[in-house]
Image: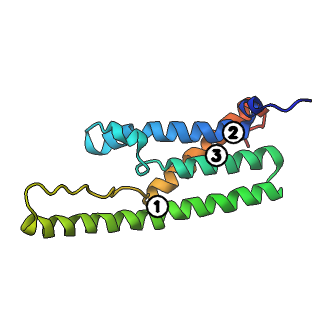
Amino acid sequence: MTNSIFDILRSPVAISGFLAWFLGQGFKPLFNYFSTRKWDWMLLISPGGMPSSHSALMTAVSFAIGLTVGWGAPLAALAFAISGIVIYDAMGVRRQAGFQATRINKLVEEVFNKTASAEYVFENLREIIGHSPAEAAGGVLFGAMIALIVCQLMAGIPFK
């Protein structure tokens, strides 16, 4: 049996992760449209929004590992631990950084509108870089669903 980099294309774990990330990122403009009635295509490359593609990716990989190698395998435990860190980071550290960016942008705008010359140009900090708990939960559910479907189709793992 030869190993090739292309073997990853036959892996339900890799396919689950890639599809969850790609589709999760692709659905962001659609979910945003339902809440704002405006299309924002920049969400295709944005780190925030519904669903969390980080959460979807990590959950899909973790679930696919659990489904294919067993829930009690050390690899499944490692995958879920790393997923927890990524999801916590998306909801915690990155979300707080976004809140701070909003406040810094407002502060700089107030200060420089009063004192800066017209030629001063300030580039705003990115404000939406994290996820709300609902966005992370949406990503988790989406990722689990993708993993279940991919593993069923590719590995014949039955739905239970």
Q: Can residue 62 be seen in this view?
A: yes
Q: How crowded is mark 1: few (under 14 residues within 10 Å), some or many (20 or more)?
A: some
First along the sequence among labels 3 and 1:
3
Gap between marks 2 and 1, in whole Å? 25 Å
Q: Which of marks 2 and 1 is in front?
A: 2
Residue at label 2? 14
Frontmost residue, 111 versus 73: 111
Q: Is residue 72 visible?
A: no
Frontmost residue, 145 versus 53: 53
Residue at label 1? 133
Disc 3 element = helix
Q: Which of marks 3 and 2 is in front?
A: 2
Circle 3: residue type: Ala
Circle 2: residue type: Ala
First along the sequence among labels 3 and 2:
2
Q: Residue at x 33, y 56 (%)?
A: 126
Residue 158, relative to residue 120: is it above or below? Answer: above
Q: Where's residue 90, x and y in %?
A: 49, 60
Q: Which residue is drawn at 61% across and 42% down?
A: 145
Gap between marks 3 and 2, in whole Å? 9 Å
Residue at label 3? 60
Disc 1 element = helix
